[in-house]
Amino acid sequence: MANTASKQQVLLTIPMYPDMELAAAKTASVLAELMDFDEGEVEEIQLAIIETCINAFEHSQSEDKTVVIEFIMKDDELEFKISDRGVGIASERRPGSELLGQPGLHPDLRKRGWGLEIIRTLMDEVDVETGANGTTVSVVKKKTT
Amino acid sequence: MLNKFDIQIRTEQEHAVIETAGYLNDALGEQLSEKARGLIQDGYTQLVINLEKTTLINSIGISILIEIIEALDEREGTLNFCGLSATQERTFRMMAIAKYAGIFPDEEAAIANL
């Protein structure tokens, strides 16, 4: 862990294997607890990182099948950047299009395509950079107390 | 295995309670779906899913819960959830699950409102 006056950084590389998103969530949980986020906020951070990892696992088509997560702990916020070296998110695959899933019995009860919406609801800032060399999702959770 | 999960089922005359423990993802969700569909086939159309010991639920796990809601709707059944964390409840409400299934703080209330 690099230690500076105002921020600390943790780097984690995980393979795209089932349940490996839990390794990222566990790391995020430890860091968030160190930063004194409350229990509810820790769970929100864990869920956001799980959803981001799952999106990368399912859609990146990355040849190296790894996800790199950079956690940056600042005085008043935890930032994490999740990067893959996949094919990027084509506009027709972005949430709002067919990834939203087929309507079932109840049209407003769609089953898939919620990941990014969940992340945006639970976190303070979400930014997606995507291109032919991969995707990086940057997420910020600010401390409330 | 990173994710240790478990499903327990308790049946009464009029209803059944399914209790899940661990990380509700696709793997646990598929097991849960199988158990729920088995109960529905056996005539249990009043179900409670107790999530008190379920540490995290991802969007794939929630999509499987939606399939259980739809399967019960086809039999005019009822599904109530209980034991959700604040984050889980917020996510369920965002995904419109609360429109089609009850959300209660504890099992007693969930059963009473079937």
Image (spheres, coloured by chain):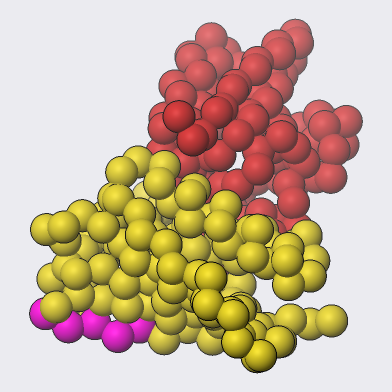
Colour representing chain B: red
Q: Position of residue A145 (x, y in %)?
A: 84, 81
Residue B71 in sight here? no
The reply to whether the magenta stretch includes residue B19 is no
Instruction: Please indicate whether residue A26 sits to the left or right of residue A20 in the image.
Output: right
Instruction: Please indicate whether residue B67 sits to the left or right of residue A125 in the image.
Output: left
Q: Residue furthest bottom?
A: A6
Q: Position of residue B52 (x, y in %)?
A: 75, 37
Q: Residue at x 53, y 9 (%)?
A: B42
Task: Depth check: give the residue in front, B12 or A29.
Answer: A29
To which quarter of the image does residue A79 belong? Answer: bottom right
Task: Depth check: give the residue in front, A138 or B38.
Answer: A138
Q: Position of residue B63 (x, y in %)?
A: 45, 47
Q: Is residue B95 above or below residue A80?
A: above
Q: Is residue A95 above or below residue B83?
A: below
Q: Is residue A53 above or below residue B103?
A: below
Number of residue marks? 0
Task: Depth check: give the residue in front, A84 or B22.
Answer: A84
Instruction: Please indicate whether residue B105 sits to the left or right of residue A107 in the image.
Output: right
Residue B109 in sight here? yes
To which quarter of the image does residue A68 belong? Answer: bottom left
Q: Residue at x 74, y 51 (%)?
A: B85
Colour representing chain A: yellow
Q: Position of residue B39 (x, y in %)?
A: 55, 16
Query: Majority secondary structure of the magenta segment?
Result: strand
Q: Which residues are magenta?
A: A128-132
Q: Residue at x 71, y 87 (%)?
A: A76
Q: Residue at x 51, y 27 (%)?
A: B32
